[in-house]
Image (tube, rainbow, N blue to C red):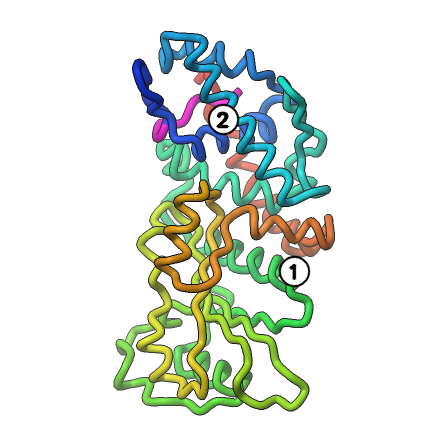
Amino acid sequence: MLALPTIGVSRSVHVHKVDLDIFCDWIESSLLFEDDEISSTDIADTLVEENIYNDYDMASEIVSSAWTELRRRQSWISQGTPFSIGGYRISRILEWQEVPGHSFCLLLSLSKWYRSWAQQFGTDYTEQGELFEELTKESLETQFSDWQIYRTGWSRTHTDNLGTIVQEVANRLAESVGDISQWTRPLAKDAGLDLLCYRPFPDRRVGIPVYLMQCASGGDWDEKLRIPDLKIWTKIVVFTAFPKKAFATPFAFLDHDFIRNCNIVDGMVLDRYRLLAAAKTNEQWVSAPLRKRLITWMEPRVSSLPGFEA
């Protein structure tokens, strides 16, 4: 198994001080990147051996909760799951390279739980962000086949200035461009918009479903829940009907966090398992070119994941 996360798994004596979402990510990552099979007894033993719990029965309680959550997670992605979950044992049935979307989202999440490991790869997150935007785009295109998904986010390979982006958005939606210079900063690259998601009708008229999406791949995702700012975007594009916001992140949320985040976004939220649900439509939903880029990005990170022996 991988080393226990440095965040979210704390010594628990009278009450549980283990964050269930992080704990489940650790189990999934240990299976996908390290072990072929893990039993509930293995995990409870590890928690006691690592001095997280004194009491085996109490350790077994959090393991039982994790089993329930992992079953629920896997039910959402159906045949795309890389695991087989039994009563007391979880087995890997697909290699991490066979589920690049799942693996990539897990590694992005681990960057927050294993900060020292993540820091060895530097602080330039441009490529990471670009890959996550592309992954989100392909997930949406698979799940919403009659929608149009246009990637607007700035990157090294996508360097359109804000004026060009705004004009393209307006053209695609048959809307008018507003006053960009008045409502944005001079150095604004994309004004917080990463993906434009819309469902056109054959008449190409206005009054259609429109989502303006932020893709947040880093550990500071919660600081981006209110991005893009619709007060700005509804001035730089003169919308006939008010658009909605959307938010995508590789992290997996428990229900209470998911509901809270939906309320803040006031729109559509795609966490890890909503993104991975594309596998219910097409198991091979990640395109060959993106699959290759994801695996290349992941290989050095997977090979250096922290184990107990480290």
Q: Residue at x 65, y 90 (%)?
A: 203
Q: Is residue 206 above or below residue 136?
A: below
Going by the numbered disc 1, the residue's amino acid type is: Gln
| Secondary element type, mark 1 | helix
Q: Nearer the viewer, residue 25 or 18?
A: 18
Q: Disc 2 to disc 1, how far (Cα)?
A: 30 Å
| Secondary element type, mark 2 | helix
The crowding category of the residue bearing disc 1, from other C-alpha atoms within 10 Å (few below 14, some 14 to 19, many at least 20), is some
Residue 31 percent coordinates (x, y): 59, 26
Q: Residue at x 50, y 68 (%)?
A: 195
- Say which label, 2 or 1, has the lower sequence index: 2
State which quadrant residue 51 falls in: top left
- Residue of label 1: 143
Q: Nearer the viewer, residue 89 or 289?
A: 89
Q: Is residue 4 magenta?
A: yes
Report the magenta residues as a range.
Answer: 1-8
Disc nearest the viewer among 2 and 1: 2
The answer, for residue 155, to whether it is visible in the render is no
Q: Residue at x 53, y 33 (%)?
A: 69
State which quadrant residue 227 falls in: bottom left
Left or right, 206 with respect to 55, comes to: right
Residue 258 percent coordinates (x, y): 43, 48
Residue 165 percent coordinates (x, y): 45, 79
- Residue of label 2: 65
